[in-house]
Image (spheres, grey):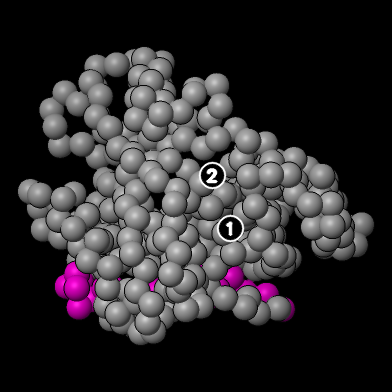
Amino acid sequence: MRHFQNILTKQTTAIAVDFAADALRCIAIEQAVDGTWTRRVAFELPPAPLDRSMDDSALREFSAKVSEAGLTGCKCRVTIASHLFRMDMAQLPSSMSENELAASARFEATDRFGMNAADVMIQHAPLFCKTAGRCALLLMAVPLLIIRNATQAVMAAGLSPCSIENAACAALHGAELRHDGFNIGLIAFMHIEPKQAVLLLMKDGQLQSVRAMQGDWAVAAPSTEVATNINDNSLALEPVASEGAWRWSSLAEETLRCMRQACVESSLPTRMLVTGAPSSDHELLETFKGVCGLESVSLNSAGWSTGAEKLTSDTWAAALGAASLDFKNISSARAA
């Protein structure tokens, strides 16, 4: 085990911890020359709410799992459930310098979200923009309390966090690597979490639009409670208290409206790619196909990697996508 731990410390294995709404997940993977991902470690624990510090008993269990797997002292990437982020899109003058753009993006985010700049971490990412002289940005903000609780839990468990990312964006990274042809044409990508579904439109590998839709998208029969976390660019949808296709009708209909709004001057995407626990639900895929009129395919993150133990559900896209960010660095280190 000591030899295995030394290998991990040298960054030959990529590690990620995912604070999802339904579970705390940790995975360690290696990438072969042919691109195959092999799981060295994969475990799930009960969900760890990030609005407060992790309970002592839960922390002891997390730490014991990390130690048992030989991961103590290793660097890892962290993902946080997307419903904990505030997201919106903005357009700014393209003539701005990088520093001016960052400052303006921060001002836009705090103004739109009504947050105190000292209490949140704000990030921005470029989007495709057709308007001359303008640049489009995705704005994201997450409370520092959330970041602090996540990093403290990871460090207390014996790991060293090196980055934090929105789970939907991390899942997108994994999907790009695991699906052939992802960067060709106009594609709709949907990452579905228990409390929020995030729609990302990609054109030739470039992010064009992002919309978040709140609801109860857990695998189990939905409850009658509606999510209350209001997001300027997030839509709260009424859950449908029934099994089968009717359950997904509101999500599919809102997805169609979002795509029409984003694709005013162009045709709709040719396909819908889905990750998340419900992605293998045949009724979900058929509802997307029937309402949105495009072929819908589950990317099945449970099958993205191989390993002795079988992953129990299709909920690993965020963790695998985050871990995959290290593969380029690992390859460079090996070459050196």
Residue 119: give x, y in percent of width and height: 56, 27
Query: Mark 1 is on which residue type?
Result: Ala
Mark 2 packing: few (<14 Cα in 10 Å), some, or many (20+)?
A: many
The quarter in which the C terminus is drawn is: top right
The quarter in which the N terminus is drawn is: bottom right
Residue 334: give x, y in percent of width and height: 68, 48
Mark 1 packing: few (<14 Cα in 10 Å), some, or many (20+)?
A: many
Q: Judge from the rendering whether residue 260 lies leftward or rightward of residue 197; answer left or right.
A: left
Counting every numbered tag in the picture gives 2
Q: Judge from the rendering whether residue 336 lies leftward or rightward of residue 272; answer left or right.
A: right
Q: Judge from the rendering whether residue 325 lies leftward or rightward of residue 184; answer left or right.
A: right
Residue 274 lies in quadrant = bottom left
Report the disc number at residue 86: none
Residue pictured at 58% horizontal, 49% vertical: 79
Residue stretch in magenta: 288-308
Return the residue nearer the eye: 200 or 148.
148
Residue at the limit of the structure toward the left, as seen here:
265
> What residue sits right under mark 2 in the picture?
165
As displayed, is residue 114 above or below residue 197?
Answer: above
**Residue 87 counted in the magenta span:** no
Query: Mark 2 is on which residue type?
Result: Glu
Residue 62: give x, y in percent of width and height: 79, 57
As displayed, is residue 78 above or below residue 221?
Answer: above
> What residue sits right under mark 1 in the picture?
20
Residue 115: give x, y in percent of width and height: 46, 28
Residue 10 makes an appearance in the image: no
Return the residue nearer the eye: 334 or 312.
312
- Secondary element under disc 1, as helix, strand or loop, is loop
Label located before the other in sequence (2 or 1): 1
Return the residue nearer the eye: 100 or 80.
80
Residue pictured at 34% horizontal, 49% vertical: 234
